[in-house]
Image: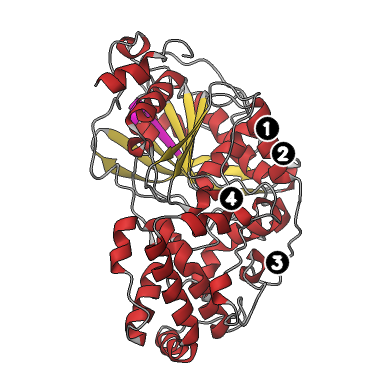
Amino acid sequence: MRKSLRWLLALVVLIGTVGAGSAAGAVTAAEPNEDIKDRILAIPGMSLIEEKPVVGYRYFVLNYTQPIDHRRPSKGTFKQRLTVLHKATDRPTVFHTSGYNVSTNPGRSEPTRIVDGNQVSMEYRFFTPSRPDPADWSKLDIWQAASDQHRIFKALKEIYGKNWLATGGSKGGMTATYFRRFYPNDMDGTVAYVAPNDVNNREDSAYDTFFEKVSTKACRDALNAVQREALVRRKEMVDLYGKWATENSATFNTVGSLDKAYESVVLDFVWAFWQYSSEKDCATVPKPTASTKELYDYVDEKSGFSFYTDQGLAPYTPYYYQAGTELGAPTLEYPHLKGLLRYPGYFTPRAFVPRDIPMKWKNSVMRDIDRWVMDRSERMLFVYGENDPWGAEPFRLGEGSEDSYVYTAPGANHGANILGLRADEQAKATAEVLEWAGVAPAGVLQGKILPKPLAKADSKLDRQPVERELRQFLRP
């Protein structure tokens, strides 16, 4: 679409079993007489958990048998959850990943709405219940997960034969990017939202620079003052935390103590604010002279005192394991907290993974991904939020990347999307997604009309809830 889309800027200004699914076959454009559920369940290793009613779609929650180790598929299998939001076999398909658990409630990603297509969503390996038993944690890496995705694609491509796009937000955007690196010919395009790219895990000054410049000085100072005051009043705040922990039977074996968990929550605070709040929320920041209960409640609202308990951390052990072995994690300086931190150097992924799970850092993994994106990627779109701290270390394109784009949504946080881009970039991105999916209207290709999503908005399907658990510093 290289030449045909040059009009956009001017126009906007003017207005199964191991080995299952290994061979792809051709499908006809017409909808087969056989029921779509029967076709999906005919895939070896595929089984139905449940079907849920959705207006305009069929929606299936499924299990698919995967090898624990794709390099040695004879060494055991596990069941991996996925969902299929079925529109029609003659529509494109969007492969959506969150990088965590899969939601079993129907939802539609932005690219799915743009192309009016089907959507396949995959649960990341080792997130329960998609975890081998016993769990060999050495088999949790980005290549194994990409290979899970590849096998699902190959199996379902037999049914959904039109173009496929990969998408995901945050760790899901990272997942979509890694999938494309290891299996570059599977997808016709990739849309990665707010995907961090921690190439050098020892060099994190970009994050400090972000917090020195984001928004206004008044807002930054107000947030830093609350964070500092929460440590100045540690005793009173920890007393409230301890009372809550007793009432809720919360334990702290993984982090080591309630006091360590408290410090972790406080260190999350400013990051969590910018991850999911906006500049208008600066007006809600309490003054450091506020009551201890008011400060406690506000920190709890933004960071979540429940998270660093054993109960809060357990579902995210796979993420912290990956952050400490391959993905990397940001480290900040916190100059305004000098003299108040009791556990300097503690706030790392290793601290949040049970000690009986061994971890070893692999230094070259993210560098390989970064080089591939810059030197060999094509048909990739990265979307970031201007006020999202995770965008401080973004993916960048190089001379070898083709038909690829990096856009930043003004004022947006970790929920940045194509709709939030500047008008010219929104039009360009939407047009590219339509073309990659093979469904761009003739008027768009000819430069006669502005591109727009092919499916009507749906307040239920398109709702993207911000879960409380998402508001964590070390978890994109």
Q: CA distance from mark 1 to mark 2?
A: 6 Å
Secondary structure at numbered mark 3:
loop
**Mark number for residue 368?**
2
Q: Position of residue 88 (x, y in %)?
A: 35, 25
Secondary structure at numbered mark 4:
loop
Q: Is residue 233 left or right of residue 358?
A: left
Q: Are marks 1 and 2 in contact (CB under 8 Å)?
A: yes
**Mark number for residue 372?**
1
Quarter of the rendering containing residue 175:
top right
Residue type at mark 3: give it: Ile
Q: Are marks 1 and 3 in contact (CB under 8 Å)?
A: no
Q: Which residues are magenta?
A: 114-120
Q: Nearer the viewer, mark 2 or mark 3?
A: 2
Q: Are marks 2 and 3 in contact (CB under 8 Å)?
A: no
Residue type at mark 4: give it: Arg
- Whether residue 87 is visible here, answered yes or no, is no
Mark sitting earlier along the chain (2/4): 4
Secondary structure at numbered mark 2:
helix
Q: CA distance from mark 1 to mark 4?
A: 24 Å
- Whether residue 185 is visible here, answered yes or no, is yes
**Mark number for residue 357?**
3
Q: CA distance from mark 2 to mark 4?
A: 22 Å
